[in-house]
Image (cartoon, rainbow, N blue to C red):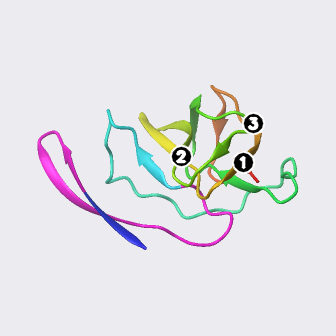
C-alpha cells in the first residue's frame, strides 16, 4: 500500500510517496516530528538483530529502524495501542522520529529507557 504526501521544507514543496512493507517483525512506520519534517531521508530495510531477551509469548517486537537515541517513551506497559499510535521518539541524525505501532495491540514490554542508544534492528517495544 502506498501513500502520497506533500510536504514543505524551507518554503520548497515536495511530493513524497511512502510504501508500507508487509510481514511480521517489520519496523514501525517512521514519521518525522512536526517541527522537523524530513521525508527525504531513506528508511533502511529491516535487519535481523542479535538475540537479546526473548520477547513475551505471542508478542511482536517493534525494532529500531535506524541507529539513534531514545528521546521519549509515549506509552506504558499494559497500555492498549492502535495501529499508528506513537510509541516513542527516536532521535537520529539530529531529527526526531516518531516510532509508531505497526498494529493494534497491548504494550507487553518496554525494552528501552529515555537516553538509551539503539542500533538498527534492536528491539524497543513488545506488543501482544
Considering every residue shown, the one lying at the far left of the view is: 11
**Residue 93 in sight here:** no
Lateral position of residue 81 relative to residue 128, left or right: left
Place of residue 36 in the rendered image (x, y in percent of width and height, measured from the top left): 32, 36
For the residue pair 93 and 6, the one nearer the viewer reads as: 6
On the image, numbered disc 3 is attached to which residue?
77
Label ID, residue 106: 1
Lateral position of residue 71 relative to residue 13, left or right: right
Q: N-terminal of the two: label 1 or label 3?
A: 3
Disc 2 to disc 1: CB gap under 8 Å = no
Label ID, residue 1: none
Label ID, residue 85: 2
Q: Residue at x 53, y 36 (%)?
A: 89
Place of residue 108 in the rendered image (x, y in percent of width and height, measured from the top left): 78, 45
Q: Residue at x 87, y 52 (%)?
A: 54
Mark 3, other Cα within 10 Å: few <14 / some 14–19 / many ≥20: few
Q: Give the SS element for disc 1.
A: strand
Is residue 62 within the magenta segment? no
**Residue 53 in sight here:** yes
Q: N-terminal of the two: label 2 or label 3?
A: 3
Mark 2–mark 1 distance (CA, rounded to whole Å): 11 Å
Q: N-terminal of the two: label 2 or label 1?
A: 2
Q: Residue at x 72, y 54 (%)?
A: 61
Disc 1 to disc 3: CB gap under 8 Å = no
Q: Quadrant of the C terminus?
A: bottom right
Lateral position of residue 28 relative to residue 20, left or right: right
Mark 2, other Cα within 10 Å: few <14 / some 14–19 / many ≥20: some
Residue extent of the magenta highlight? 6-28
Displayed quadrant of residue 74: top right
Amino acid at each position: 500500500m502506498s501513500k502520497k504526501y506533500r510536504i514543505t521544507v524551507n518554503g520548497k514543496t515536495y511530493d513524497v510517496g511512502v510504501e508500507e512493507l508487509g510481514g511480521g517483525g517489520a519496523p514501525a512506520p517512521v514519521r518525522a516530528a512536526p517541527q522537523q519534517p524530513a521525508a527525504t531521508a531513506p528508511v533502511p530495510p529491516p535487519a535481523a538483530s542479535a538475540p537479546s531477551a526473548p520477547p513475551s509469548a505471542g508478542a511482536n517486537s517493534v525494532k529500531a529502524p535506524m541507529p539513534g537515541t531514545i528521546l521519549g517513551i509515549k506509552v506504558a506497559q499494559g497500555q492498549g495501542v492502535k495501529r499508528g499510535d506513537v510509541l516513542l521518539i527516536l532521535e537520529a541524525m539530529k531529527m526526531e522520529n516518531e516510532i509508531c505501532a505497526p498494529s493494534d495491540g497491548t504494550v507487553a514490554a518496554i525494552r528501552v529507557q529515555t537516553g538509551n542508544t539503539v542500533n538498527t534492528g534492536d528491539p524497543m517495544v513488545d506488543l501482544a
